[in-house]
Amino acid sequence: MPSPAPLETTTQRLADPATANRACQRCHQEIASEWRSSLHRQAHTDPHYQSQFKIEPFAFCTGCHAPEADPRKPVPKTISDLGVGCVTCHVSDDHVLASTTPSSAARPGAHHAVTRSAAFSTAAACANCHEFSFPRAGLRESRSGPLMMQSTVTEHAASAFADRSCAACHMPKVRGEDGRLHRDHRFLGGRDAAAVRRSVRASPSWDGKTFALSLEPGDVGHAFPTGDMLRRLKLTVSVIDSSGAEVDRYVRHLQRHFGFQHGATTAPRRVLIRDDRIGTTNAPVRVTYRPKTVPPGGSVRYDLTYERVVGPPDERGDVLVDGAISVVAGELALD
């Protein structure tokens, strides 16, 4: 199955991955066009990734973001521009890898043999790149072992969609110019506004004193948001008086909250303080807020926003927001 570049070797997986990838694109032009617009393609060139990599330039990071390079050396431009390419997922030990299909026979005129794998149609195809612990595990630990940087595959196995592959949602079938269906290779993920909004079911209420918002997983096969530390939900609650002016405000971030544990004779260790994302337990996430004032004829407005941030957010939320999608918003009368 596809994997990051192994850190225990000093050689590239393919002798000339950029040339091999161009060969894929020549024949699979429509899929290649989708891939070129994807975040997989931008895995190493994305400016926000590069800004974080300058802070912690680990071979561990290069292994995932430039998997066709030697992770211990500077990444050549041709491989940086490739990112996670066609060859990363579909070439394994000189075999062209694909999933099994109802009709897996080779097509007439095919230029190469295809190795069909049932595992490629499951979460195993994504697991090696989307579930891993922090590097330098001794300085980043949880009570049960190494602290996980991403645990999407474990979250998926515990979700209501465990019987579906990652591709079922992240690579929906689209009809190509030739009339045949293929998996969409844009990998929109958290940039697909409609999919983001389907990920949450929200139930707001006001009892005369307290605003409450109950949040449960919707059509999502993992905790929400999943992935790295740079994803969070921001809930903003505003109390509005009868003139339309805001008289009170409450903000809360739902995410994985990290901190440091200090020992008298040991180096500080990064630890997970709490995780209040949606879907991490079987219980809904319930947020309550009691305003300082309840103006007659007023209302309470709420907006839950999915945010992509640059750099680990602090508890005050003082970070640069790269992009945001309003997930659910509404207004309730206070009377």
Image (tube, grey):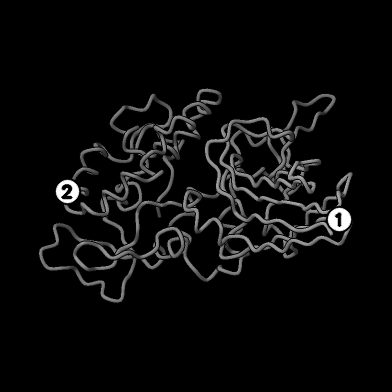
Q: Secondary structure at mark 2?
A: helix
Indicate the quadrant where residue 136 lies: top right
Say whether disc 1 or disc 2 marks the residue closer to the N-terminus: 2
Q: Is residue 226 left or right of residue 25?
A: right
- Residue 294 position (above or below residue 269): below
How far apart are the alpha carbons under marks 1 and 2? 60 Å
Mark identifier at residue 271: none
Direction bottom: furthest residue? 102
- Residue 109 position (above or below residue 246): below
Where is residue 56 drawn, in percent x and y? 55, 26
Q: Which residue is mark 2?
A: 26
Q: Secondary structure at mark 1?
A: loop
Q: Is residue 210 left or right of residue 161?
A: right
Q: Which residue is mark 1?
A: 210
Q: Nearer the viewer, residue 286 or 83?
A: 286
Task: Check disc 1: other Cα within 10 Å, few if <14, some if 14-19, many if 20+.
Answer: few
Name the quadrant of the C terminus. Answer: bottom right
Where is residue 295 drawn, in percent x and y? 86, 49
Q: Give me the residue at 76% from left, 45% from top.
A: 243
- Residue 59 position (above or below residue 294): above
Q: Give me the residue at 57% from left, 35% from top.
A: 321
Q: Give me the residue at 48% from left, 32% from top.
A: 49
Name the quadrant of the N terminus. Answer: bottom left
Q: Amino acid at mark 1?
A: Thr
Q: Amino acid at mark 2?
A: Arg
Q: Nearer the viewer, residue 279 or 23?
A: 279
Where is residue 223 drawn, in percent x and y? 62, 56
Q: Nearer the viewer, residue 319 or 143?
A: 319
Where is residue 185 drawn, in percent x and y? 35, 54
Direction left: furthest residue? 109
Find out whether the residues at labels 1 and 2 contact each other: C-beta distance under 8 Å: no
Q: Nearer the viewer, residue 326 or 28?
A: 326
